[in-house]
Image (spheres, rainbow, N blue to C red):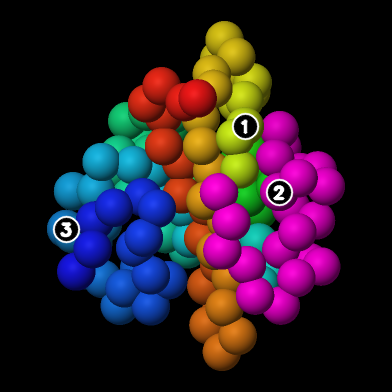
Amino acid sequence: MSNKFETVPITELVEADVEWLDGLPFGVIGFAPDAIVTLYNATESGNAGLSPQRVLGKHFFEEVAPCMNNFMVAQRFDDEDVLDDIVPYVLTLRMRPTPVRLRLLKARGCATRFVLIERKATN
């Protein structure tokens, strides 16, 4: 299995067990077509300071990350049938502005969509 932010396929994220996802060096948030969070890895929990209990079952763009409820992130999941794009972004909710890279993933025939969050220095 690939553990690279840029190349891990959506199929591996869907099929992976929790231990593997928790060991990834970047945040992984999976959500259903209605944007309800179904997967939240340990890396993202530690980086964001939010426990899985506070995130799982919540609406990602309204309750967890309203700073991503915009045309750059949320709207793309609505507008595009297939999505695999890396976007430079700045997280601002509940923290000082933090530059990150987001990888937005959505595939036909896959009910789970993903936002991957890489918090290391970006160019």
Give the CA separation, mark 2 to mark 1: 10 Å
Q: Residue at x 57, y 10 (%)?
A: 96
- Give left or right: position of 52 versus 69: left
Q: Residue at x 64, y 20 (%)?
A: 92
Where 116 falls versus 110 (above or below)?
A: above
Location of mark 1 (residue) = 89
Q: Indicate which disc residue 19 carries.
A: 3
Secondary structure, mark 1, is strand
| Residue 54 visible, this angle | no
Q: Tell me which residue sits at (18%, 59%) in the image.
A: 20
Helix, strand or loop for disc 3: helix
In what quadrant of the picture does the N terminus appear?
A: bottom left
Mark 1 and mark 3: Cα distance apart in space: 27 Å
Amino acid at the residue labelled 3: Glu
Report the magenta residues as a range. Answer: 66-86
Q: Please determine whether, in this image, residue 83 is positioned above or below residue 103.
A: below
Asked if residue 119 is positioned above or below residue 9 in the image, the reply reads: above
Residue 73: give its label.
Answer: 2
Q: Are marks 2 and 1 in contact (CB under 8 Å)?
A: yes
Q: Nearer the viewer, mark 1 or mark 3?
A: 1
**Of the residues tagged 2 and 3, which is closer to the observer?**
2
Q: Earlier in the sequence, mark 2 or mark 1?
A: 2
Horizontal side of residue 86 vs 45, given as left or right: right
Classify residue 105 by image quadrant. bottom right
